[in-house]
Image (cartoon, coloured by chain):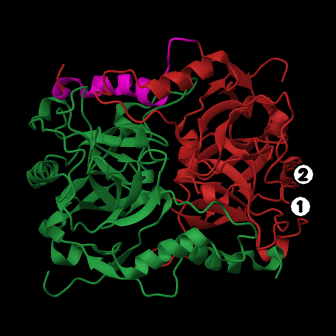
Chain colours: A green, B red
Amino acid sequence: MTIKNSLYKLTLVLVALLFSHAGLAKTQWRHLDANNTVLMTLPYGKVVIELAPNFAPNHVAQFKKLIKKGYYNGNKFYRVIDGFVAQAGPDERHDTAPELAIESEWTPTANWSFTPVQKNDLFAPQTGFVDGFPVGYSKQENKAWLLHCPGMLAMARGNSADSGSSHFYFTIGQAPRYLDRIMTVFGRVVYGMNTIQAIKRTATIEGETPVSAQFFTPIVTMQLMSDVPVKERINIEVEQTNSHEFKEKLARRLARKSAFFYKKPPQVLDVCQVPVLSRIVKAKAID
Amino acid sequence: MTIKNSLYKLTLVLVALLFSHAGLAKTQWRHLDANNTVLMTLPYGKVVIELAPNFAPNHVAQFKKLIKKGYYNGNKFYRVIDGFVAQAGPDERHDTAPELAIESEWTPTANWSFTPVQKNDLFAPQTGFVDGFPVGYSKQENKAWLLHCPGMLAMARGNSADSGSSHFYFTIGQAPRYLDRIMTVFGRVVYGMNTIQAIKRTATIEGETPVSAQFFTPIVTMQLMSDVPVKERINIEVEQTNSHEFKEKLARRLARKSAFFYKKPPQVLDVCQVPVLSRIVKAKAID
């Protein structure tokens, strides 16, 4: 098999091995709760976000309340820096949401469903997943927190810890992990990250024409999935990260046994580089 | 200052602090060599790539030779996985380039211009920059290698180490650092990463309609910048990563002294999350 006549075919193999790494065991899925799922419509497509009420309950509650009021419809992504964040929120006249106490970490209960990924990660004593969300954990402090991996949703704030209210951002590049534990992360993109990546950048480099505000990407609508007519919903299931099958996938990803790895990489995993799969399913009759 | 009346204004401050972190000292710039710079035109915009002849000389030489023959014009990005890679190359009939011996690492000379960033990074004993490129370094092995940070250009290959020829990929998500030292990285995007992010994804999730090959993003043209008429060139300068000013910026980024950091993050830097600035300048008379 030479690269010349097989690269197109190899594509599928590599997708399987390197990324989706569909393996021997069957993926276990979890159906998202439409009451904690957001459908954001942009001019370029649709995005589905799973909220994290277990980790940032007050931020999620306020975000849902604002969404139900139509607060975000027509808002612009006014701060979009390639490789960093895409941030949106209302203009000053409509910026009426109350400030919230920060919810950047929590104290795990003894029986929490944590799937460990890596010890002594550069920024955390331990990383792992809870319900598909990337999590940092310190046993010594008995604290856990959501990580700023790509595709996470977090609340913007001023200098005060407790100044977040409604302006939010998605992380769109290499994880800015130095923001872990000092920002409230409260959701993650489970579908349409390519649409997030299409958001018009507002930050330009020296020598480039600045981007006029009229070209900022608008949010067409932001809805709770439970408020979307059943026929128009995007029904997402996500991989169960506490399943035996997912743990086996982590082990395979660490071992890199494929022949492609003619030399084995270090046996470490960057939690932000471990894909958690999503799939689209038909609406459940009970929805 | 409340978040409600100042978030738009705060934007500029945050851009400065968190990302471009324009500091006290003046940025030092290096003009790119048009003979080692590539202009890739996509339907959505233009991309400028700096090649790395010092680190992967044979890959750069072959890539330049192919570009000069118009080899890549009309090629498609046929393997594009959100958060991972955008890969392009000719179809089987036109895939005539010879295979190359891998150039995934090199032995640094005693006087190499290495700016250290982080010790005991998850994947490397030491990370840093050389000429704006992110580099891993092992003193013990006396080896250095280019890192798979977002926006790097590398050669695809089959299972054999020495099977790369012309199919290439850009990294478009969280750095797949497990590919360090087993792939030949030979360039980096210095302008137009947003255009790279606009490339049509070819990998879909379960339940989604597969993307037909007719919608794959084509390369309109791929040219050496030195072959582009002077008036049509994009003249890029990049930050000098061996300058005193850049080292000061690294130190400030590590210290996070801004009031925004009401609690200081761990004093570590992810080399792939450190921006290296570019700017557009007018053509030099000597070009």
Image side of residue A240 versus residue A200, left or right:
left
| Residue at 27% over, 69% down | A113
Q: Nearer the viewer, mark 1 or mark 2?
A: 1
Circles 1 and 2: CB distance less than 8 Å? yes
Numbered disc 1: what chain? B
Which corner quadrant of the image does residue B133 belong to? top right
Secondary element under disc 2, as helix, strand or loop, is helix
- Residue A152 shows up from this direction: yes
| Residue at 77% over, 19% down | B284
Residue B136 in picture, x, y percent from top left: 69, 44
Q: Quadrant of the C terminus of chain A?
A: bottom left
| Residue at 38% over, 48% down | A148
Numbered disc 2: what chain? B
Are the residues flagged by discs 1 and 2 from a single subunit?
Answer: yes
Image side of residue B225 versus residue B133, left or right:
right
Is A153 rendered above or below residue A11? Answer: above
- Residue B282 shows up from this direction: no
| Residue at 28% over, 78% down | A30
Residue B101: image tag: 1
Which corner quadrant of the image does residue A54 belong to? bottom left
Total label count?
2
The residue that mark 2 highlights is B58
Q: Nearer the viewer, residue A209 or A69?
A: A69
Q: Which sits earlier in the primary sequence, circle 1 or circle 2?
A: 2
Q: Which residues are magenta?
A: B3-25
